[in-house]
Image (cartoon, rainbow, N blue to C red):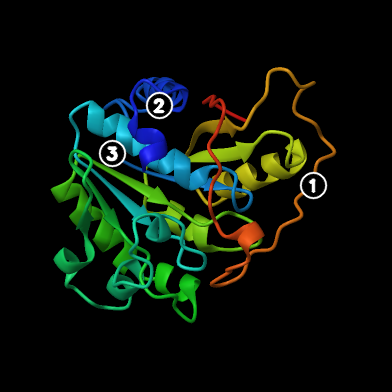
Amino acid sequence: LEDVADPKSFVSEAYVTVLSNLAFSTDHGVPRLFMLTSMGQAEGKSTSALALAAGLIRAGKSVIVVDADMRVPTIDKRIGKRGTDGLSNYLAGDDNLDAMIHPLDFGNLSVLPSGPIPPSAPDLLSGERMGTLVRELLKRFDHVVVDSPPILGLADATLIGRNVEGVVFIAEAERGAIRAISDAIGRLRGSKTRVFGLILTKYSASRSGYGYNYGYSYSYRYGDDNPDHDGEDPQPRQSNLGGSA
């Protein structure tokens, strides 16, 4: 969290712009319940979730970030709560939500960890418990930010999308083909998930633009501990939120 905690940092200021644009996405300002997803790992999704939450905290709001990636948790690891009770426990029927929510030493910010890695994340997400959870969290917090798994070939993000106001899509500059990103966004829209816009991370204005020929060369597995694909999201250099992609 320290990489987004400084309100004067370039990263923080970039995400303030994102929040300003998000404020125009609904008739009640910044969505109270939204999720972030991407094509794959390490594109800046979890960093973006924490940075947006930090911006809302500085605006005087109470926020909870839900680590909904029950396959390769990232935020859990950042706050030292990996493997503790969390989302997977609640979705499996455990109602002791108070014990799963962890306040952080950063304003009125809390985190709900992903919980132990379940045998089947889609089975848990396809039930009614996710909807019950977010409704309960909205009673306790001003905003709920859901850090969802990437799209890839998985059903997780589209299942989570049924329970949120909309999604912010994260794309790393010069990493994925625009056609693939467009297809992923189309998949979200096809599942009736509203797409608020796209944040482009690690963009360098000195380079020649966002290429069509870059491909994805990572893997994505349950409990992936490969140091090259550990779910850590590198700090973005610049972020832009658009109305469509």
Q: What crowding class fits label 3: few (fewer than 14 Cα within 10 Å), some (14-19), or many (20 or more)? A: some
Decide: few, some or many residues near mark 2? Use Cα within 10 Å; few <14, some 14-19, many ≥20.
Answer: many
Image label count:
3
Residue 4 in the figure: left or right of residue 193: left
Question: The residue under label 2 is which amino acid type?
Answer: Ser
If you read the primary sequence from the N terminus, does the residue marked by circle 3 or circle 1 appear first?
3
Image depth: mark 2 or mark 3 in front: 2
Sequence-wise, the earlier of marks 2 and 3 is 2
The residue pinned by badge 1 equals 215
Amino acid type, label 1: Gly
Q: Residue 31's image quarter?
A: top left
Q: Residues within 10 Å of mark 1 (few under 14, many from 20)?
A: few
Looking at the image, which residue is at 81% across and 41% down?
Answer: 214
Residue at x 42%, y 67% (from the top left corner): 125
In the visual, does 96 lie left or right of 209? left
Where's the C terminus, which quadrant? top right
Q: Is residue 153 above or below residue 138?
A: below
